Image (cartoon, helix red, strand yellow):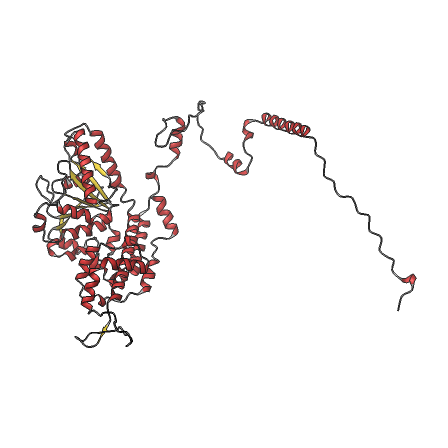
Amino acid sequence: QQQPYHQRPSPPPPSPPPQPRHQPQQRPPPQQQYQHQHQHQQLQHQRQQSQPPQQQQHQHPQYQQRQLQPQHAQPPQPQQQAAPASAPSGLALPPTPTNVAAAASVPDVKQLSLLTEEEQSSIFETLKKLYKRKVRPLEVASGYAHFHSQPLNAADFDAKPMILLLGQYSVGKTTFIRSLVQRDWVGQRIGPEPTTDRFTAIMSGTADERLIPGHALAMQSDRPFQALASFGNNFLTKFDGAEINGSPFLDQCTLIDTPGVLAGEKQRMGRDYDFKKVIQWFAERADCIIVLFDAHKLDISDELRNVLNTLRPHQDKVKVLLNKADQVNSQQLMRVYGALMWQLGKVLNTPEVCRVYVGSFWDQPLVNTENAALLAREKEDLMNELSDLPRNAALRRINELVKRTRSVKVHAYIIHYLRKQMPYTFGKKGKLQSTYHHPPAVEHPPPFYPPQEKQQRLIGRLENEFVQCARRYNLPLGDFPNLDEFRTNLLQIKDISKFQKLDKSLVKEMDRVRPLSSSAERRLARSI
C-alpha cells in the first residue's frame, strides 16, 4: 500500500554547486626570482659569519658525540703552501710533515695481530680430521702411495716449518746453516772437499746437544720423519738428526742439510739409495727450498739437473742463493749473475725464473767491500723471507692439503678409467673368455686381447688415455702427474683390474673438504 503524500519522506537537499579548481600559484618573474635567491644566500652567509668557529661544524648527533670525546692537544702547525701535483706511480714523495702523518696512520704488516698457538693448534686439528676422514680412505683405495708419496701422519701437520738446502758440494750449505743457528752442532763438518755425505735434520731440543741416528729418528711419532723408513736401511744409515738447545731460529723452523750433489759417474755408483726420491719426499713437506750456487762454480751436473726437474711442482717454494759473492768485484758479479740466470733458464725451461739472492754468509770479513751495501740488503731480504715462514705455517698447511686433495682425486679417476678399459673375464684358469656378447649377424667383431696384452697397450698409449680421462670426468690436464713417472710405476702393477672399484661417495665427500670456516678464514687472512 502506498503511503499518503503528506507522510512520505522529504527529498534530500540539493548538493552544493561545484567549486572551481585550485589554480596554481603564479611564479614571480625570473629577475625577481633570482633577486630573492641572492638575498637568501646573503642572509645565510651573514648568519654563518655571526656564529663562532666552534659552531660551524656539522650538527649531526654522530659529530656531536665525537666533539664530546677528549682529544690530545696538538701544537698548532704552520700553514703550508698548496700541495704539489701527485707524483707518478713508483716514485715516493719527499718526507713532508703531511706525508709523515699519513704514513704513521697506516699500520705495518708486521704489526698486525698474529695467530695464537691455540688458534694454530685448532686449525691443525681440523686439517688432521679432514685428511683422516675424507682424503686418506681414497688414497688407500686407489693405491696412491705406490705412485706418489706415503700417507701423511699427525706429526706432518704439527711439525715446524721445514727449510731444505740443496746444492753441489762446497757451495756453503753448512756454513749458511751455521750463520742462521749462530753456533756449531754435533757432527758438523766444513771444508772445501765433499764433507757432508748424509742428510742431517737440525732441530731444536730440550736436552743437551746430541746426534740421533736415522733409525731411531724414524721411529719417533712426534717427528715428521716416520715415512722415511720406506727408503730402507741404506738411506737411514745416511740420515741423522742434530738437536741444538738455545737457538731462537730453531725454535721456529727446522733445517735439512743435504749431501753435495756430485758430478760425472759418481752419482750413479756412489749412491746406494734413490737420491731423487728422497729429495722429492723432502720437497713435498718443506715450506722453503733454497738452492745454493758458488760464484766460482756455476756448472749444473746431471744429478743437479734431475733434482731441479724434481722441484718443478714446487716452484713457489724455491729460492736461489748465489753464495760467496764477496770474492768477486762488481763487474765480475754482474757477469756471474747473468751466467747463472742463463743456466737456470736452460734447465728449468720456463719463461719465469725464481728469485735469486746474492750474499756471503761466512763468519770472516768480506774479501771485496765494493758490494757491501748490496750484500747487506740482499741478506736482509732473505732473512725477512725466512722469518715469515712461521707466520704463514697454517696457510701453507692448508695449501698443501688442498693440493694433495686435487692430486688424489685425479689419481683415483685415472685408475678408475684404466680399470674400465680392461676386459672382464670369467671361467677357469687358462680359459679366458670375453664378456663381449655380439649377435651372430656381426661378421667382424672387435678383437679381444688378453688382460696382460690389453694392459701393455694401455700403457703404450698412456698419453691419449690421459686426454680421454680428462674429457670424460671433466678434469684439468694441469693436475695430471708426470707421464713418464706414472708409466714407470704402472709397469710394476701386474693387473690393473685388481684395484678396488671407485666409490663415488668418497669423491663427493672429498670435494666438500673445507679446511676452515668463514670466520676462521677471515681471521687467518687478516693475520697474514
Tell me the quarter of the image containing the C terminus.
top left
Quadrant position of residue 171: top left
Tell me the quarter of the image containing the N terminus.
bottom right
Residue nearest the observer in this picture, 191 or 39: 39
In the displayed structure, does residue 429 sit left or right of residue 94? left
For residue 394, say whether it is visible. yes
The residue sitting at 27% across, 45% down in the picture is 390
Horizontal and vertical percent position of residue 146? 20, 60
Q: How many marks?
A: 0
Residue nearest the observer in this picture, 286 or 465: 465
Q: Is residue 310 above or below residue 437?
A: above
For residue 202, say whether it is visible. no
In the displayed structure, does residue 211 sit left or right of residue 412? left
Horizontal and vertical percent position of residue 49? 59, 25
Horizontal and vertical percent position of residue 220? 18, 55
The residue sitting at 87% across, 58% down in the picture is 10
The residue sitting at 68% across, 28% down in the picture is 32
Q: Is residue 78 above or below residue 211?
A: above
Q: Is residue 504 above or below residue 294?
A: below
Residue nearest the observer in this picture, 42 or 107: 42
Horizontal and vertical percent position of residue 389? 26, 44
Residue nearest the observer in this picture, 163 or 69: 163
